Image (cartoon, rainbow, N blue to C red):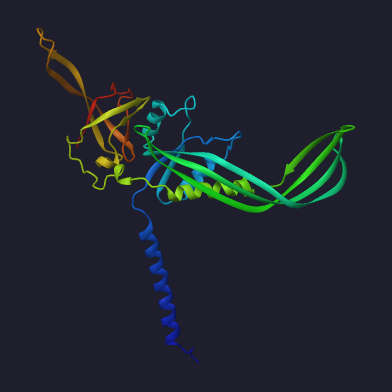
Amino acid sequence: MGRSRNPQNHLKLLMVLVSILACNLDLYAQIPQHTLTVAVLPSQSRLNYRFPYATDQLVHSLANSTQYQVVDSLSLINGRLSSQVLEEAQKMGVHVLFQVSVTLADQRTGSGINAGLGQIKLGKIYDVGLAVSKTTARAEVVLRAFDSQTGRVLTSVNGRGTSVGSNVGLNLDYTKFAGSIDRYQLGMRQYSSTSIGKAIQRAIDSAVNNIRIQTSNYLADDVQDPAAGQLNALIADVDGDVVYLNRGRNAGLEPGMKVAVTAIVKVIRDPATGETLEELTEIVAVLTVESVRNRIAIASRQMPDGTLADVKVGDLVQLVD
């Protein structure tokens, strides 16, 4: 005997599938088609103590945003955003640098329970206690964004966060002599799960959500499709066996493309005035593009005979067939 089929059940199943597909399409439509490439500078604190995890928390928040692609963290030189730091950021294809400063971090401990667990011997005799308390934490941060080309501050926003939770720890009290006690507290929670850790993370998340950067200044809407001889790029840096070009995906470059490097080999000057009459150029190398980022491309200096191409910063680069 065959099974009875209910057309209404089939209709309901079809409606569910259509609904799921519509939700997925809606989510896809909300994903930005262009993302800024960013890096993070070491965090700062205006307080008397530091928060070494704030940089990692900022990286976490940016990486979980659909607006940014985080490539790395950068170290400051002598605590300053120097030209060397900006140069390194540009090599990495970074558009914007972020830095977070913790301006307020306050954690209050309310009523709790303290229980003695007796004495133990760990080389010395300690009185052991278990402490359980309620904690309330609040934090405030300042998030700044810098242009990777100029170091100019693009924008600065505040972020606030609070967290309420419990804290569990062990107290070890050691009596050295009458009236003097050494006390040690052993926390049982990771930083990210503490009230202060959660408050700072929420403050950073709030700042990241509120910051606004004009992406059109960094991402070209119309990517060029260069023809042979029409690229007009320059070598921006020479580093070991690779060179960095000052054009990238925004100029239509792709990995595997061949580029010719043209150098000035002779300058003819007027003997009376010293004026440059003509510059003689020639192609000194043909390089292969290995990787491409938004505004730079990286090409290998390796020549077919195993030697490195003799090129320098400022040499003209053009696309070849």
Left or right for 178, reference 43: right
Using residue 110 as the reference point, say whether residue 231 is left or right of it.
left
Instruction: Tell me residue 40's x, y (percent).
Output: 46, 38
Residue 227 spot, x, y in % from top left: 17, 40
For the image, the number of numbered tags is: 0
Vertical comparison of 78 with 53: above or below: above
Foreground pick, 139 / 55? 139
| Quarter of the view holding residue 254 | top left
* Residue that appears at 25% across and 35% down: 258
State left or right for residue 137 relative to residue 319.
right
- In the rendered view, would you say 25 is above or below 130? below
Query: Picture coordinates of residue 90 (x, y %)?
Result: 36, 33
Q: Residue furthest bottom?
A: 1
Question: Which quadrant would residue 24 be assigned to in this image?
Answer: bottom left
Q: Quadrant of the C terminus?
A: top left
In this rendered view, identify the residue nearer to me: 261 or 277.
277
Query: Residue 222: x, y in percent?
Result: 23, 47
- Residue at position x 55%, y 47% in the image: 201
Residue 236, placed above or below residue 207: above
Q: Residue at x 49, y 24 (%)?
A: 78
Of 126 and 308, which appears nearest the observer? 126
Residue at the extreme top of the image, as rendered: 272
